[in-house]
Amino acid sequence: MTTHVISARVYWEDTDASGLVYHTSYVRFMERGRTELLRGLGLQQSQLLEGAAGAPIYFVVRAMELDFRRPAVLDDLLSVETRPLELGGASLTLDQRVTRGGETLVSAIVKVVCVEAGRARRMPPDVREKFERLMARSPV
């Protein structure tokens, strides 16, 4: 399976009073990683909301299990890695990691669900096909 990677720089706004990255900032970094994974598949969230997949859909986080291992600090250059693990009818489970120089700082298992009009729904076939192709690729 392919691992999608983006870079994220730590800015002052990402830190707490001690100068360490505040725990919720990692969640924002991972959200950016998931958004860029979708974009890389040709699935822009604004277009999905406008009905590009046949109906206005979006993805919401259903569950997230986080493991904080080491802190990042101001000015660190981080990598946000996103790898699909499991594809369900309406859901996608992802392995996400925030790393610095190859060392995992935070890892997460994230389950997102496809939603239409506030309710879970099966992914449209063209959206599902893109995730299936991604999961079938060799590691990068």
Image (cartoon, rainbow, N blue to C red):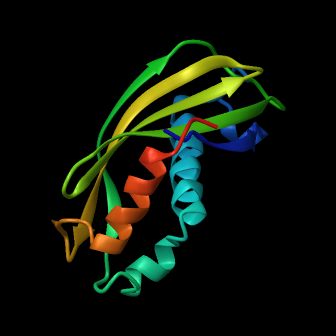
Residue 42, by quadrant, is: bottom right
Query: Is residue 70 toward the left or the right of residue 50 in the image?
Result: right
Q: Which of 69/3 is in front?
A: 3
Q: How many marks?
A: 0
Q: Residue furthest right?
A: 75
Looking at the image, residue 40 lies above or below residue 93: below
- Which residue corresponds to the image point at 33% horizontal and 63% vertical from the top-left? 128
Image quadrant in which the C terminus is located: top right
Residue sitting nearer the eye, 23 or 85: 85
Question: Which quadrant of the figure has residue 93?
Answer: top left
Q: Residue at x 75, y 24 (%)?
A: 73
Location of residue 54 in the rendering, given as x and y in whole percent from the top left corner = 30, 86
Camera sees residue 75 = yes
On the rendered structure, is 88 left or right of 52?
left
Up the image or down, 12 lies above or below 62; here it is above
Q: Position of residue 89 (x, y in %)?
A: 18, 56
Tell which of 1 and 110 is nearer to you. 1
| Image point (73%, 32%), residue name | 78
Is 75 situated above or below 49? above
Q: Is there any visible trace of residue 17 in the rendered image?
A: no
In the image, what residue occupies the spot 47% across and 51% down?
134
Residue 129 x %, y %: 36, 64
